[in-house]
Amino acid sequence: MLRFVVLALLLSTPSALAKDDTVLRGLNTVRLVVESLDADAHACGLNQEQLTAEVERRLRDLGVPIAYESEPPRMPYVYVYVNVVRIEPVHLYSYSFFVRLNECVMLRDGRTICGATTWDKGGLGVVDAATCAAGVRAHVFPKIDLFAKAYLAMNPKQRSGPPPAK
């Protein structure tokens, strides 16, 4: 039990990367990658294709321009990862997730380019089997909204969708 509490505290600690949204300044279009879901996530009621469509629609509706797979591979991308673990025999599911912006960066040597996470939000939770998929979405989508809000604050002229409702 103590290990679970320590893990929960570590995973719920905000990332130092997420404290400064200026890393989003100058972004034009981003790609979207939603990681494959495992068997427990499927048993919980989550589906990768549906989650991808929902996240893409949400980002577009909030005004973030999303590129298609044919765009250059070095283009920054929003990366959504959800991990779900079934807790037996109590019929609960534990989940963790993160929403990140990954992009290519040049290292200090001026020659080496590699991938790096430049914006990061995440969390974890426990839900019962009956509300698992809805509970996970209810925790993930506010982080998607937070990314969109930060993106638009740093790139006010990039808005791709209708203006947000007041």
Image: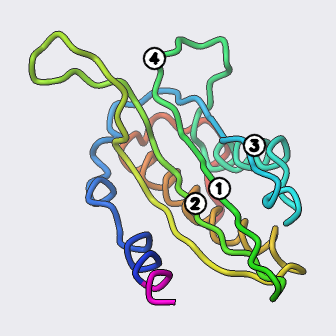
Judged left or right of residue 89, residue 113 is left
The residue identified by callout 3 is 52
Judged left or right of residue 165, residue 117 is left
Quadrant of the rendered image containing residue 20:
bottom left
The residue identified by callout 1 is 82
Instruction: Give, as a three-letter code, the residue at label 4.
Output: Arg
The residue identified by callout 2 is 97
What kind of secondary structure does the magenta stretch mostly adopt? helix
Instruction: Tell me which residue sits at (61%, 77%) in the image.
Output: 125
Position of 109 relative to 152 (above/below) = above
Q: Which numbered circle lies on residue 94?
A: none
Position of 24 relative to 137 (above/below) = above
Residue situated furthest left in the rendering: 109
Quadrant of the rendered image containing residue 109:
top left
Label 4 sits on a secondary structure element that is loop
Position of 103 relative to 113 (above/below) = below
Quadrant of the rendered image containing residue 31:
top right
Q: Are marks 3 and 1 in contact (CB under 8 Å)?
A: no
Magenta span of residues: 1-5
The residue identified by callout 4 is 74
| Mark 1 closeness class: few <14, some 14–19, many ≥20 residues within 10 Å | many
Q: Nearer the viewer, residue 38 or 46?
A: 38
Label 1 sits on a secondary structure element that is strand
In the rendered structure, which disc, 3 or 2, sits on the residue that comes first in sequence?
A: 3
Name the mark nearer the viewer: 4 or 2.
2
Instruction: Give, as a three-letter code, the residue at label 1.
Output: Val
